[in-house]
Image: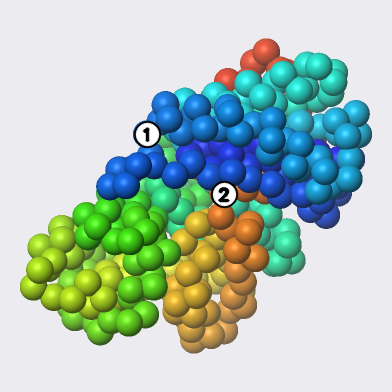
Amino acid sequence: MICLGIESTAHTLGIGIVEGRKVLANAKSMYRPPEGQGILPRAAADHHAQAFNPVLRQALSDAGVALRDIGLFSFSQGPGIGQCLRVSCTGAKFLSSVRNKPILGINHCHAHLEISRGLLGMEDPLYVYVSGANTQLIVENREKPAAGRFSAPGRRIGNRGAGSQRFLVLGETLDMGLGNLFDVFAREARLARQHGSEVARLASEGRYFELPYTVKGMNFAFAGLLTSAKRSMGERRAEDIACSLLETSFAEICEAAERALCLTGKSGMVVCGGVAQNARFCKMLSEVCKSQGAAFGAADPQFNADNGAMIAYTAICEWGRGKRQKLDALKPNGYWRIDEVE
């Protein structure tokens, strides 16, 4: 089966085409906000709508297929920015209706996990999911414990026990996502490119100094770290602040991830999401795995950045597991957590 997947949860419109487990195309176009500003939801959605046809044509051309060859359509149903999510939802539903083919709505976070695990060939790992808005330690609930068990020490998720959860969040950020931490700092510091990649470039030239460090069990927090970094502007070099910001935030997650490895006894760890493209972070996590005798893996950067291929890949996996959905019942869900995926 050939599946077309559409991603539009935030700044990226991506359309990917997958056959079986082989990625045939992964075209995308990224919205770039005005200097000094974050994502403007309406402007981002307008960008995605205008870029939709060109990106679709590019994906079909790269894959060497036509719309008539697509057997399954899929889209990022959530979580994400509401206006942006409506673009992928509307586009996928239109294509599904016109071609009279089935459609599936896919959880964006699940897609990051699924394509990373599949391409790396790692079975049942601990997932370190680090993106703009989400930073979580996740495991798949394969043992199906009795209802009423806790998914993490002292915490339930929603109104259900861990026994009914497909994915368990062992730990997560208590305030902001790791990617947002870097992007906000880049804007506050008025860097040349107001993006996490520019913070990483600066960090490579800096020297570490101590900043607030917050880990609570397997949860972590970054707001105080950001505030302290901002207060250091003008007193310390931007390179040193960037270095300390990255090293401290990465160390927080590494400590929590090591604790999660010890708790679960997992034999492997997969890092995924946009921040997984950072080489320094991957090196730190790999050292954690080495000390615990666990395997470490990170997919190719193109699959850690937001992309349509991961949506299509996950849709094929879910279709094979028997998932079916009615077109009329599908609508965006901007608050769809990974531990709500069934």
Q: Label 2: few (<14), some or many (≥20) within 10 Å? A: many
- Residue at left 34%, top 56%? 194
> Which element type, helix, strand or loop, lies under badge 1?
loop
User: Relative to residue 336, is residue 118 depicted above or below?
Assistant: below
> Which element type, helix, strand or loop, lies under badge 2?
loop
Q: Amino acid at mark 2?
A: Asp
| Left or right of 234 in this view: 272 | right
Name the residue tied to disc 1: 40
- Residue at left 53%, top 45%? 30
Looking at the rendered image, the quarter that the C terminus falls into is top right
User: Relative to residue 86, is residue 4 depicted above or below?
Assistant: below
The mark found on residue 306 in the picture is 2
| Left or right of 114 in this view: 83 | left
Give coordinates of residue 64: x percent, y percent.
88, 45
- Residue at left 68%, top 54%? 115
* Residue 254, image quadrant: bottom left
The answer to whether the residue labelled 2 contacts the one labelled 1, judged by CB atoms less than 8 Å apart, is: no
Q: In front here: 81 or 152?
A: 81
Looking at the rendered image, the quarter that the N terminus falls into is top right
| Left or right of 300 in this view: 254 | left
Distance in Å between CA atoms under marks 2 and 1: 17 Å
Give coordinates of residue 201: x percent, y percent.
39, 73
Give coordinates of residue 170: x percent, y percent.
44, 56
Closer to the observer: label 2 or label 1? 1
Q: Amino acid at mark 1?
A: Leu
- Residue at left 56%, top 55%? 305
| Residue 283 in view (yes/no) | yes
Of the numbered discs 2 and 1, the one sitting upstream in the chain is 1
Residue found at the very far top of the displayed protein: 328
* Residue 210, image quadrant: bottom left
